[in-house]
Image: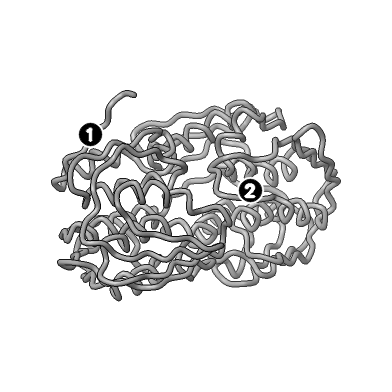
């Protein structure tokens, strides 16, 4: 959606889920002057009249990905004013690498009253090395470089499927990009891009969440329209717990064991084990046979779901960025509080296997990343409902 800023005209996106973050980004683009229309699972954006260059605090504060308008705005309008980002409270996630990249491309960056001001008469290609792979940083620079003069190299680039999907979308607009999905991405700038028409890839984290649900309940679930090739590391780890996978004509069949086995894991940048699956995997390990050790190497504050899982009877201890989970025979339902997006999902995973009733409050986090998850679960036999608080 942020990439549509790069070109005038009417842009069409399909396979778009109805999520809070989609409507937030739509509101942000509308503030900038775009026409935004969401119908069924399609988004239409008219970017002919984008004139404003400010992404305000009240929108960026609720969704960190709003910072993705930074690169496209500087590339198209020569300036951008973007609030420092907010979103899930899972640790410090600074945008210094985004700003470093834009500075190397000739932008002048200043920080003022919680806002980033970036200006450039014309961005120029540059060699940019990221100390740590950053998904949104890679995406921001890739979008900006698409309209920059000359060639840009992003070294130690993020390799996530979402980066590749964005590159594919930009290439369909006329961008010249090589190497997306590898550690070095090469972008040769062009003078203009054409409107976007693109179908979004399936959400691998939603797919992974349903995989853990099959595992923790001993269920048999077929997930339609997913991309198993985006989840190799997770599938391998889940197979070690006893979950069985079978590719079928209409999707991926996931069969949970009678009781999962304990397995250690460590979150890593793609293609490693995804940090966005750590909480759901921990819920699975709560009832596993044996003891598992889960190390979080991406975000320093991503164990906030642990306190809630303990309320259900889970045996978890934390030391630094490592959680030790001793599997128990059963966990019990309890009133719980969701702290962030993936924590919300992990509590649902745990609740489906818990004895008795579980109530999860503050589920607005959930709606940022899952479309009608309770309706999907109802269709496969879950006793779950949404209530107004």
Looking at the picture, tell me which residue is in the foreground, 338 or 370.
Answer: 338
User: Residue at the location (67% across, 29% down)?
Assistant: 56
Q: Quadrant of residue 60?
A: top right
Q: Residues within 10 Å of mark 2 (few under 14, many from 20)?
A: many
Q: Is residue 292 left or right of residue 76?
A: left
Q: Residues within 10 Å of mark 1 (few under 14, many from 20)?
A: few
| Spot occupied by residue 89 in the image (x, y as percentages of width and height) | 55, 43
Looking at the picture, tell me which residue is in the foreground, 31 or 220.
Answer: 220
| Spot occupied by residue 207 in the image (x, y as percentages of width and height) | 33, 56
Q: Say if 221 sits above or below 7 in the image.
A: below
Does dot 1 land on a helix, a strand or a loop? loop
Work out whether mark 2 precedes mark 1 in sequence or the reverse, and give the earlier one.
2
Of marks 2 and 1, the one in the foreground: 1
Does dot 2 land on a helix, a strand or a loop? loop
User: Residue at the location (28% across, 41% down)?
Assistant: 334
Question: Which of the numbered marks, if any, corresponds to residue 201?
Answer: none
User: Which residue matches tag 1?
Assistant: 385
User: Residue at the location (55% across, 65% down)?
Assistant: 297
Q: Is residue 281 left or right of residue 245?
A: right
Asked whether the residues under the numbered discs 2 and 1 touch, taking CB atoms below 8 Å apart as contact, a structural biologist would say no
| Spot occupied by residue 368 in the image (x, y as percentages of width and height) | 44, 39
User: Which residue matches tag 2?
Assistant: 193
């Amino acid at each position: 959606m942020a990439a549509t800023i790069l070109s005038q005209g009417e842009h069409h996106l399909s396979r778009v889920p109805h999520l809070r973050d989609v409507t937030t980004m739509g509101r942000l683009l509308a503030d900038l002057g775009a026409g935004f229309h969401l119908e069924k699972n399609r988004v239409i954006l008219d970017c002919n009249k984008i004139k404003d260059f400010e992404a305000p605090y009240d929108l960026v504060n609720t969704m960190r990905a709003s910072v993705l308008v930074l690169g496209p705005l500087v590339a198209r309008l020569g300036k951008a004013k973007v609030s420092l980002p907010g979103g899930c409270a899972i640790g410090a996630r600074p945008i210094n690498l985004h700003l470093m990249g834009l500075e190397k491309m000739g932008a002048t960056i200043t920080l003022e009253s919680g806002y980033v001001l970036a200006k450039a008469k014309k961005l120029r290609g540059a060699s940019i090395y990221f100390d740590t792979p950053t998904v949104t940083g890679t995406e921001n620079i890739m979008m900006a470089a698409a309209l920059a003069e000359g060639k840009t190299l992003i070294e130690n680039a993020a390799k996530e499927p979402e980066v590749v999907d964005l590159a594919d979308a930009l290439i369909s607009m006329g961008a010249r990009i090589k190497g997306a999905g590898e550690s070095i991405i090469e972008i040769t700038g062009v003078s203009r891009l054409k409107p976007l028409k693109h179908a979004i890839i399936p959400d691998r984290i939603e797919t992974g969440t349903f995989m853990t649900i099959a595992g923790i309940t001993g269920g048999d679930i077929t997930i339609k329209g997913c991309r198993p090739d985006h989840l190799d590391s997770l599938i391998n780890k889940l197979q070690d717990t006893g979950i069985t996978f079978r590719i079928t004509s209409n999707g991926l069949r996931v069969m949970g064991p009678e009781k999962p086995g304990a397995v250690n894991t460590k979150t890593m940048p793609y293609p490693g084990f995804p940090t966005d699956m750590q909480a759901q995997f921990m819920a699975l390990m709560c009832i596993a046979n044996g003891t598992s050790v889960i190390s979080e190497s991406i975000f320093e504050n991503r164990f906030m779901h642990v306190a809630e899982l303990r309320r259900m009877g889970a045996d978890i201890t934390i030391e630094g960025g490592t959680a030790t989970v001793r599997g128990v025979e059963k966990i019990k339902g309890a009133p719980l509080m969701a702290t962030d997006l993936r924590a919300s999902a992990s509590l649902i995973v745990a609740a489906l296997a818990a004895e008795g009733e579980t109530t999860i409050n503050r589920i607005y986090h959930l709606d940022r990343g899952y479309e009608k998850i309770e309706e999907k679960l109802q269709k496969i036999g879950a006793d779950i409902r949404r209530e107004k608080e």
